[in-house]
Amino acid sequence: MLRTGNPVLNEQTFDSTRSMASSTGMTVVGTAYKTLFLLALAVLSAGVTWPMVMSGDGANAVPWAMGGAIAGIVFAIILRFKMHWAPYLAPAYALCEGLFLGAISAVFEARYPGIAVQAITATGGTLLALLLVYCTRLIKPSQNFRLGMAAAMGGIGIVYLIGFIGSFFGWQIPLIHESGPVGIAFSAFVVIVAALNLVLDFDYIENAAAAGAPKRMEWFGAFALMVTLVWLYIEMLKLLAKLRRRN
C-alpha cells in the first residue's frame, strides 16, 4: 500500500489514472527532470522579488510575494483534486512560490548576510543525501515509519494553525519562535520531519512509476516533491536565523 506524509499525495493519488497508463508511462527519471525544471522556474521568478527587497523597495515586493503565496496555495489545492492539470498548474505553482521565496529569502538575507546561500546549500545537500540514502536502501520506509511521519506532520500543522489563529489576536505560542534551546529544538525537529518526508516522496514516486501511472503524472510527482522542498527550505531559513541570533 502506498502512503506518504505529503498532503498532496495519498494512496489514492494515482489510482484514478493507473488504468489509463500507456507504454510510455511515468518514470522516476522523467519526474526528476521535471522537478529540476520546476526548481528553475522558482529561481527565475525569485529574481523578481529578491532585488526589490534588497534595494529597499520592499513595499512593492509585498503584493508580489503575498500574491504568489496565495496563488501557490490555490494551485496546490486544485492540483490535489485535479491531478491531470499538473502539466499546466505545476509550473504555475513553481513560479508563484518563487515570487514568495525570493522576497522572504531577501528579508532574511538583509538581516543575516549569507543566510540564503546557506539555506539553499543545506536544502540541496539534504535532498542529495537523502536521495543517496534512499537509493542505497539504507532507509526503507515501513508502514510504522509512514504513520509516524503522518502523525508528526499533523502535530506540526496543528501547532502552526494555532499560531496563525493566535496572530490575529496578538498572541503567539511561547518559546518556539525564539532563539533559545526550545525554539532551536523545535525548528530542528521540523527540519528533520520535512527532510524525512523527502524519503517518503521518493518511495511514493518510485512505486507510482512501477504501478504504471501515465506520463503526465510525472508533473504531479514533481509538484509534490516541490511542495516538500519549499517547506524544507523555509524551515532551514528559520532554523539558521535562530542559530545566528544566538551568536
Image: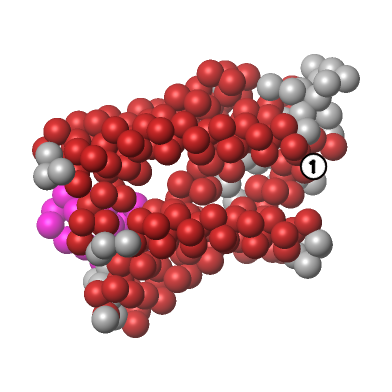
Residue 61 forms part of the magenta stretch:
no
In the image, taking residue 104 as reference, residue 79 lies left or right, namely: right
In the image, taking residue 65 as reference, residue 138 lies left or right, namely: right
Q: Position of residue 229 (x, y in %)?
A: 51, 48
The structure residue drawn at horizontal position 46% and vertical position 47%, both measured from the top left corner, is: 230
Q: Position of residue 176 (x, y in %)?
A: 31, 70
Residue 25: quarter of image = top right
Q: Residues within 10 Å of mark 1 (few under 14, many from 20)?
A: some
Closer to the camera in the image, 147 or 224: 224
Closer to the camera in the image, 17 or 226: 226
The structure residue drawn at horizontal position 45% and vertical position 71%, both measured from the top left corner, is: 188
Label total for image: 1
Residue 160 forms part of the magenta stretch:
yes
Residue 59: quarter of image = top left
Q: Position of residue 159 (x, y in %)?
A: 37, 60
- The magenta region covers 158-173
**Does residue 145 show up?**
yes
Q: From the viewer's perspective, is residue 89 above or below residue 110?
A: above
Mark 1: secondary structure: helix
Q: Position of residue 15 (x, y in %)?
A: 75, 29
| Quarter the C terminus occupies | bottom left
Q: Residue furthest right?
A: 23
The structure residue drawn at horizontal position 65% and vertical position 62%, both measured from the top left corner, is: 129
Q: From the viewer's perspective, is residue 81 above or below residue 118?
A: above
Give the residue pinned by disc 1: 207
Main SS of residues in magenta: helix
Task: Please name the amino acid that badge 1 sits on.
Answer: Asn
In the image, taking residue 152 as reference, residue 163 lies left or right, namely: left
